[in-house]
Image (cartoon, helix red, strand yellow):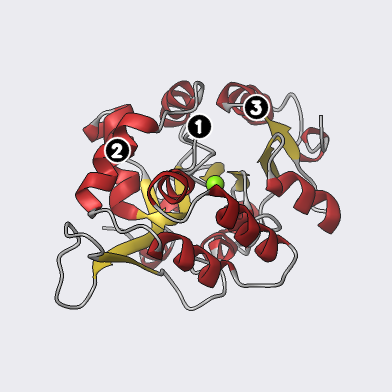
Amino acid sequence: MGSALDIALPALKTKPKFIFFTDFDGTITQQDSNDWMTDNLGFGAELRKKGNEDVLFGRRDFRDSFADMLDSIKTPFNECIELLLKNITLDPGFKQFFEWAKENNVPIVILSGGMEPVIRALLAHMLGKEEAETLQIVSNDVAPRPGKSVNEAGGWHIVYHDDSGFGHDKSLEIRPYARLPGEERPVLFYAGDGVSDLSAAKETDLLFAKSGRDLVSYCERENVPFTTFQDFTEILATVKDIVAGKTTVKEAATGRK
Ligand SMILES: [Mg+2]
């Protein structure tokens, strides 16, 4: 029987000393699936980039900008998934990281601004169905528009996880773990690449920000300690060293490399 704490904080179930929170799109995958759909099926890259800038400079909420992006895609949802399976690839080091984390009791929790059916389909395709089911995913969802099915043209829309300006405030998920008392509190990692990670960036002990992406500039501007990564092989090397006690989270937060 699980205690109330296990239910509220599912990543504590195996009493881990470390928890790895991560973004999905552009972090576990090499391309962002929502950007890919917007650029190829929706209103295009130019308007998308303008929307991202507005969010980064605080002119607009992520929530509204992201819904506009997805609303510009009229392709039936099942066709979107088919196209994504052909065009989105896994980070070259993620599978190895996933195996290592499983063997070493480091739960991986995916916190995503994307839509759960897309994430589940991509993970099942890239890691295998059973492996994919072991990952905890906290994300947004999808629903049909009134009188339509999601698999009709213009038939779907995103359903946000919460009422925040982020649509999914990733910090809400991390904070209860961060606030655990001393002995019980695992070391918390986070990996991300973009504007949907802003809310999570300040919450963990070590933040991995993808090289050359928006999250790096944000961390520098806001003085959030971080280190950069190209792919999960670098993350694995750093996390292994920390777990083995060869380095600390503070020493690993070296900023832009
Ligand atoms: Mg991302």
Picture residue at 56% right of the left edge, 59% below the top: 174
Q: Is residue 197 above or below residue 207?
A: below
Residue underneath mark 1: 30
Q: Quadrant of residue 246?
A: top right
Q: Badge 2 is on which residue?
A: 83
Check disc 3 and report the residue beneath it. Answer: 230
Q: Earlier in the sequence, mark 2 or mark 1?
A: 1
Residue 120 at x, y percent in the picture: 29, 44
Query: For the residue labelled by badge 1, is the local secondary structure a helix, a strand or a loop?
Result: loop
Cα distance in 3D space between marks 2 and 1? 15 Å
- Image disc number at residue 119: none
Nearer to us: label 2 or label 1: 2
Q: Nearer the viewer, mark 2 or mark 3?
A: 2
Mark 3: give few (<14), some (14-19) or many (20+) Cα within 10 Å.
some
N-term-proximal mark, 2 vs 3: 2
Can you give x and y, in whole percent of width and height, for residue 61 in the image? Answer: 61, 72
Q: Which residue is found at the position 59% from the left and 25% from the top?
A: 236
| Amino acid at pointer 3 | Gln
